[in-house]
Amino acid sequence: MTSPRPAIASPVSPHALLYEEAIALHGAALSRLARTYELDPDRRQDLLQDIHLALWRSFDRFDGRCALRTWVYRVAHNVATTHVVRDRRRRSRALLTLDELDDVPASHDTEAVAERQALLDQVSELLQQLNPLDRQVMLLYLEGLEAATIGEITGFSAGNVATKVHRIKKILASRLRGGHGGASDA
């Protein structure tokens, strides 16, 4: 009769620890990010899984030269942007720049919308109309990141980030008041 072999604890890789830390700290933000990039629940879940997979794989290249939060957002936004571009090609639906969004008529009458969820859905829909870079800036802003951090993630200057956020907020506010977002609404 042979004696059982003692259990050997396998060491946890540093990449696995980084991934676990990233998800513990930023998992909820990643879910919100996916919700903003994809309205369809099934496709949103696929996007979230793609983000998690890309994060897991990315930690082989993470060298600590930027904050973990910056790395997580950068990877997640790259995956989400790729998702949007692929979806755009699939649907042949054009995305809008801030200037184009400014000229598109509002899609909802906000005076009839009384509930908070309806308002959040409307904001999400408006954010969906932005091109991926403008959407990324706004999502990071809504997550509470400062202009300098957003700039580090996106490659924009802090001043450019602040300008984009201001313009997007102005357009969103106009749309939510029932205007079309044109310059005369400001």
Image (tube, rainbow, N blue to C red):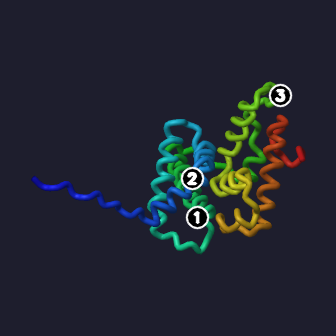
Q: Mark 2 — residue?
A: 24
Q: Position of residue 90 (x, y in %)?
A: 49, 45
Q: Secondary structure at mark 2?
A: helix
Q: Mark 1 — residue?
A: 71
Whether residue 94 is visible here, answered yes or no, is no
Q: Secondary structure at mark 1?
A: helix
Q: Position of residue 166 (x, y in %)?
A: 82, 55
Disc 1 vs disc 3: Cβ atoms closer than 8 Å?
no
Q: Nearer the viewer, mark 2 or mark 1?
A: 2
Question: What's the CA distance linking mark 2 and mark 3?
Answer: 39 Å
Tell me where residue 81 sits by quadrant: bottom right
As drawn, is 149 to the left or to the right of 86?
Answer: right
Viewer-proximal residue among 33 and 12: 12
Whether residue 23 is visible here, answered yes or no, is yes
Q: Mark 3 — residue?
A: 111
Q: How many marks?
A: 3
Q: Secondary structure at mark 3?
A: helix
